[in-house]
């Protein structure tokens, strides 16, 4: 079995979490994340727990009468909110990014990146404002002063 070489380019804040540690101020003396929502249910993936907080902050309430399943309703609400917690790195040592936009490329594929177009879209859609609102909802203070383009190997194991 070979190493996975996919990559993702995210616009957002590195939250950390792998063996290099958390990239937020809310950690204890042992480097463990102090965010209450992250430790509520040991069986829930961190990105899913964070998404629950983001959905609640946006006032999301699933419609039981809707023709689409609850998970699809959540996905649509997160798309409208414009911010996700994405997983990067190795499945056993994941790292997380709070991202307003992600571009993922699989091994053997190329994708041209129109940075000028993305910067224009970031301003028009207020990616920085959305990210700051999400950080407030999550109760996190990132080490980064402002959002940035972050390139890293990715793993999607949902």
Image (cartoon, rainbow, N blue to C red):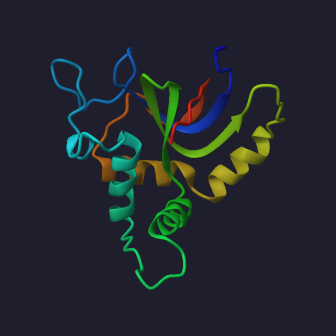
The tally of labels here is 0
Q: Residue at x 37, y 74 (%)?
A: 61
Q: Quadrant of the N terminus?
A: top right
* 107 sits to left or right of 54: right
Q: Residue at x 38, y 56 (%)?
A: 54
Image height of 68 relative to 65, above or below: above
Q: Give the image location of residue 37, x and y in percent.
A: 24, 47
* 7 sits to left or right of 82: right
Q: Residue at x 82, y 35 (%)?
A: 111
Q: Give the image location of residue 44, x and y in percent.
A: 32, 44
Query: Which is nearer the eye, 147 or 153?
Result: 153
Query: Which is nearer the eye, 1 or 76?
Result: 1
Q: Give the image location of residue 120, x and y in percent.
A: 72, 50
In terms of image quadrants, where is residue 35? top left
In terms of image quadrants, where is residue 70? bottom left
Farthest residue in the left direction? 29
Q: Give the image location of residue 25, x and y in percent.
A: 27, 29
In terms of image quadrants, where is residue 116? top right
Image height of 42 relative to 72, above or below: above
Query: Which is nearer the eye, 104 or 82?
Result: 104
Image height of 34 relative to 31, above or below: below
Image height of 60 relative to 43, above or below: below
Farthest residue in the front direction? 1
């Amino acid at each position: 079995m070979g190493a996975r070489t996919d990559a993702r380019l995210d616009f957002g804040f590195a939250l950390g979490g792998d063996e290099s540690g958390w990239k937020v101020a809310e950690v204890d003396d042992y480097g463990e994340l102090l965010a209450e929502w992250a430790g509520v249910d040991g069986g829930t993936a961190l990105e899913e727990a964070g998404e629950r907080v983001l959905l609640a902050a946006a006032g999301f309430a699933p419609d039981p009468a809707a023709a689409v399943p609850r998970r699809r309703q959540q996905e649509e609400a997160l798309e409208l909110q414009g911010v996700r917690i994405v997983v990067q790195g190795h499945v056993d040592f994941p790292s997380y990014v709070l991202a307003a936009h992600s571009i993922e490329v699989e091994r053997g594929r190329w994708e041209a990146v129109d940075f000028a177009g993305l910067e224009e879209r970031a301003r028009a859609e207020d990616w920085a404002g959305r990210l700051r609102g999400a950080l407030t909802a999550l109760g996190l203070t990132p080490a980064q002063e402002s959002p940035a383009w972050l390139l890293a190997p990715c793993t999607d194991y949902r």
